[in-house]
Image (tube, rainbow, N blue to C red):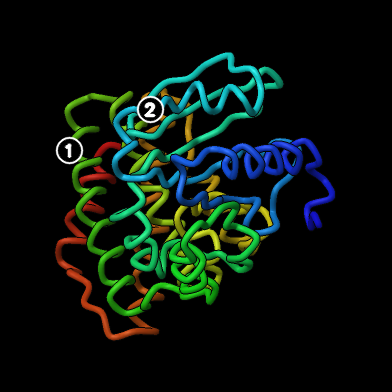
Amino acid sequence: MSFHPACSALDERIARLRQLAHADTRLEGVLLYGSWTLGEADAHSDIEAYLYIQDDHLADFDGPAFLAELAPLQLAYTNMYGILAVVFDDLMRGEFHLTAAGPGIDEVPTWQGMVHLPRPDDAVLLDRTGRLTRAARQLAAFRPPEPVATAQQLTDELTNWTLMLAHVLARGEVARAHALLHTVIAPQQLQLCRLLRDSTAHWLTPSRALEQDLPTIDRHRYVSTTAAARDQDVHTAAHNSWCWSRDLATEAADRWPIHLPHPLHEQISSLLNDRR
C-alpha cells in the first residue's frame, strides 16, 4: 500500500521496478533511498535506488537497457559521481547505483548517521537472500551527528574556507568567490545551524526544506549571504556570511566544549572589512 498519496506516478514506477527486479535473476537486491523512503516525495521527486547485481554479472549488466523497461529514456549517462543518471520520457529523473551485491550489501550498515530509512522493509524492493533487509533495518533508527566533534569540524571548515574566500576576493576573482560562497561555505553554515537548532533530519542536503525546518531569523541570515555575481554584491554577501559564521561558532562554543581561534577570526574579519 502506498503512503505517498501525492506522487502516484512515482509509486507506479517503483511498483514497476519491483516487478522487473524480481524477474531479473541477475539482481540479488534493490534498495530505494531518498525522499520516497522518508515519506516526503511529491510530484517533483526523483526515483533513487541501489541495484545490487550478482557479482559475476556486474560487468555485463546493461543498466540503461534494464531501466528502459521502466519507461522510455530521454537521457542515460554515468554522472560525475559514478552513478547511472537517467531522465524518463515524463521528465522524472532517476539515479541508480549499479553495485556488486557481495561487498555492496555489506556496506549498507556503515551508512548509519548518514542515511535514514524509517520504513526499511518498504525501501527494500527485492531481497533474494535476506541480507539486504537485515542490513537496511540497521538504518531504521535516526542517528543525529555527534554534536561536539561535528561542531568543531564545521567551525574549523568555515574558518578555513572563509579565509580562502577573502584571498580570492582580494585577487579580484569575483565569479570564483561567488561559487565558493554558495557551493562550499553555505552548506556548512546550514549544517552548523541545523546542529544548533536540533534539526538535522536533512543533514546531507541542508538546504532541503529549509523554509520549514529553520526559524525565520536563520532564514534571513542565510538570505543575507546570497548574492548576484557582481563585485560589490559578493563582497557584501561575504561579509554577511562571515558574520553569521562567527555568530554560529560563538553559539556552538557556548553550548559545547570546542575551540575557536579568535585571533585568526579577527584577522579574517579585517581582510573582509578592508574590501567593503
> Residue flagged by tag 2: what amino acid is it?
Asn
Screen quadrant of the C terminus: top left
Residue highlighted by disc 2: 79
Depth check, front residue: 149 or 236: 149
Local secondary structure at mark 2: loop
- Residue under the point 31% across and 25% down: 174
Q: Earlier in the sequence, mark 2 or mark 1?
A: 2
Residue 91: tell me if it is visible: yes
Report x, y in % for residue 37. 62, 56
Q: Position of residue 38 (x, y in %)?
A: 64, 59
Q: Which mark is residue 149?
A: none
Number of residues whose C-alpha sits closer than 10 Å to that of mark 1, classed few (under 14), some (14–19) or many (20 or more): some
- Residue wearing tag 1: 167
Q: Is residue 265 left or right of residue 198?
A: left
Please state the total of marks drawn on the protein image.
2
Residue nearest the viewer, comparing 155 with 77: 77
Q: What is the quadrant of residue 150 in the picture? A: bottom left
Nearer the observer: mark 2 or 1; the answer is 2
Q: Residue 161 in the image: state x and y as whole percent.
A: 24, 48
Q: Is 89 left, or right, of 207 in this rendering?
A: right
